[in-house]
Image (cartoon, rainbow, N blue to C red):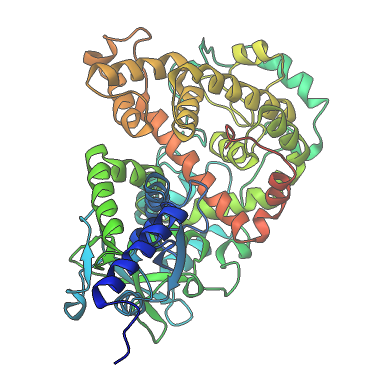
Amino acid sequence: MKRRFFTSKEAYFLFLLIAAQAVIMLGTEVVTYLYRMPPVRVVVPNVSQFSSLVSPYGLGVDGELLSSFAKEKGYTIAILRAKSANEAWTLIANDEADMLVGFGGEIPEEYAHKISAGPAYDEYRSVTIQDTKLTDNKELQALCTSLLKTVPHGVDREIYRENATFLSSVADALPQVMSPREDSEPSGHTPYAKEKLFGATVSADADTKQEKAAVTKQLPADEMPATEVPETESLDDEDCVDFDRFHMYHLMSFDNDKNGTAEIDIRNFTMLQPFFLDVVPKAQTRAPRSYHWFWRNVFFAGAGLQKDLAEFWEEVQASHTVEKLIEKHYGFFPEKLNYYVIAKLKKALRRKVPRYLKTMQTASQKNNIDPLLLTAVIFQESHFRSSARSRTGVRGLMQITQTTAKELGINRLDPHQSILGGATYLRKLWDRFEKYNLADWDRWFFTLAAYNQGFGHVTDAIKLSQKRGGTGKTWQELKEILPLLAWKRYYSQTRHGYCRGYEAVTYVENIRYYYYLLNGLVALSRPEGKNLGKLRSSLSLTASSI
């Protein structure tokens, strides 16, 4: 009998010795690989909370959460996209993916032993949508019929009488854009009494004769003040027709798609509907469902991932991170789609913005402001009407007070000077908030509120928020506090006194929405956004710009 070189016991110990030497030689890399197995394969819907094609505010709720998870826990993420929830469940059940993000509902019974669910962090309702090639959008068509006429600037009076029911819902959704009052102003400023804006008390029509005389000599005929050449606001056929027949179907993730209908999350529908007006809601589900993250149950190799995910969600829930992200990404959407304001914005981009492109480029570059944000501010303030005015005394494209115009050394009725002056003032307000240690988005929203109601009133709101137990550092907090400054029991506690803070909230939310619409038009390469897209790409903006 031949003797073996090693007995079974000797071979076993030799194997252990070789394995130990390999671990020592390769360090922790082998352990890390076996324990964590990067990259983590994450399945997401085509378009969902995870990633917004059209939003300027970031990756969406799930996208930002996933990014934070990867950064905090040291993972590399590989993204897989699924057309439907069924496809996503199949991928993770067959070990072709490690996590599902952006899908709601519960784990299918047949996969319950393979998959775990994180805590519910948000709710959603599904809506069934239908292509208008198969069903007429009567509301949109009726609005188009009434608006395809030359309408004076006082559109509120004329159109409201003809479309009282529909426009009252529009007024509720965006009250500062469309209002049933006869004196409605396009700006976020209320045309009543004297107000303190930009740190100065405004006196109506101060020195306006001298301003008008100076600017009249400089303006081309199509930019003369309204008293000289009345401006009209008519809509075109193209305002009432969708951009083309590239439907939302090519972007959204569906669980079914039969006979021109599909079922999607109503929040995702709300995000994309302004850009695809030919897709309309048909029916909405009654029972809400919850969003969860889902991951595989894998022994050893997946144990680290499972542990890290559980810890991460404990931290997220303790810090109320999801609530903050929902406010950031969705808090500004109106309850109902405003067809009229979308059409008017598109018209302004086609007809009025091109004449100011060079000035907007200079203003954006000099003050490090995204030209899309500047466009949104101008549209909110004046709808690009150089002769726009308020009874409070603010005038011009950027609705600047006489006192502020003197401080800036500009003629506020000159549209080009108004753009340059308004952008400069926005940047000055931004700089004044530096010491408050705010996140960039919150800092810009605070800046916009200060542009509308004055820096002092915003700092009053910050202090009041802190006094009531808040941080005073987020727009989510401030939008709840600012309206309180119209009540004596609250403004009596502040340095600067009474403030129409509810107007500031509406003003900022409108601009956030317009900025979103503008970014979407550029991102989707729509013709209305072509000039702004070229303008934005020509600028080199830093992280402090928006």
Q: Position of residue 54 (x, y in %)?
A: 52, 56
Q: Position of residue 99 (x, y in %)?
A: 33, 65
Query: Which residue is at the far bottom?
Result: 1
Decide: is 252 above or below 149. below
Answer with the quarter of the image where residue 17 lies: bottom left
Query: Which residue is at the far top?
Result: 495
Answer with the quarter of the image where residue 374 lies: top right
Query: Which residue is at the far front?
Result: 1
Q: Position of residue 203 (x, y in %)?
A: 54, 12
Q: Position of residue 128 (x, y in %)?
A: 33, 73
Residue 421 vs residue 190, the one in the foreground: 421
Residue 133 vs residue 119, the one in the foreground: 119
Decide: is 55 above or below 280. above
Answer with the quarter of the image where residue 484 lies: top left
- Kindly tell me whether residue 518 is visible in this rendering: yes
Decide: is 176 above or below 452. below
| Residue located at (34% from left, 34% from top) | 476
| Residue located at (51% from left, 48% from top) | 516
| Residue located at (70% from left, 39% from top) | 540
- Kindly tell me whether residue 225 is visible in this rendering: no
Count of marks placed on residues: 0
Residue 91 vs residue 130, the one in the foreground: 91
Q: Quadrant of the N terminus?
A: bottom left
Q: Quadrant of the C terminus?
A: top right
Residue 440 vs residue 218, the one in the foreground: 440
In the picture, measured across the screen, residue 83 lies left or right of residue 203, that is left
Decide: is 205 above or below 253. above
